[in-house]
Image (cartoon, rainbow, N blue to C red):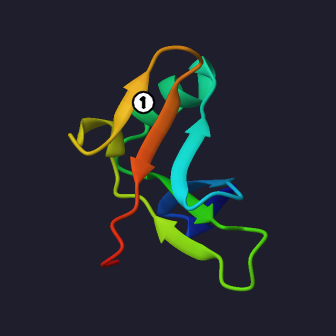
Amino acid sequence: MHIEVDDKITLYLKVKSSSENKCRFDLSGDEYNFAKDHTENYMVIFVADMDSANPKITPLEMKFWEDEKFSVCPNNFTVTYIFNDKN
C-alpha cells in the first residue's frame, strides 16, 4: 500500500498475516530490498490469529530487520517474531 500525505510524505505499508499466534511471514527479495531502500517510510503491519474473533494487529518498527528479536533468513526472507504473552 502506498500512501501520500500532503504531497510531502510517502509511506509504504505492507500488511502480512498468519492464522497462528506468532509473527512469521515471507518477503520476496524485491520486497526486502525495497524495504531497505525506503527505511524511513516503509512499515509492515502484521495480523496474528487472523481467523480468530480477536486478531492481534501489530505494527512492526521501522527497520525491524535490525532488531535482534527478529530473525531474517535469506530463504525468500522468512521473518519470525514470537509474541510475548505480556503484549
Q: Residue furthest bottom?
A: 53
| Image-based side of 10 in relation to 83, left or right | right
Closer-to-camera residue (5/27): 27
Q: Residue furthest left?
A: 68
Q: Quadrant of the N terminus?
A: bottom right
Category of crowding for the residue at label 1, using alpha-carbon neighbours closer than 10 angstroms: few (below 14), some (14–19), many (at least 20):
few
Residue 20 figure quarter: bottom right
| Image-based side of 26 in relation to 37, left or right | right
Q: How many marks overall?
A: 1
Where does residue 33 sit, x and y in percent of width and height?
A: 49, 23
| Image-based side of 41 in relation to 67, left or right | right
Residue 15 figure quarter: bottom right
**Could you tell me which residue is drawn at 33 percent across and 41 percent down?**
70
**Could you tell me which residue is drawn at 30 percent across and 78 percent down?**
86
Could you tell me which secondary element the residue under label 1 belongs to?
helix
**Could you tell me which residue is drawn at 45 percent across and 41 percent down?**
80
**Which residue was labeled with disc 1?**
37
Q: Residue furthest right?
A: 51
Where is 42 relative to 11, above or below? Answer: above
Q: Amino acid at mark 1?
A: Asp
Where is 68 relative to 49, above or below? Answer: above
Closer-to-camera residue (9/14): 14
| Image-based side of 42 in relation to 21, left or right | left
Q: Quadrant of the C terminus?
A: bottom left
Where does residue 46 sit, x and y in percent of width and height?
A: 57, 60
Where does residue 30 sit, x and y in percent of width and height?
A: 61, 22
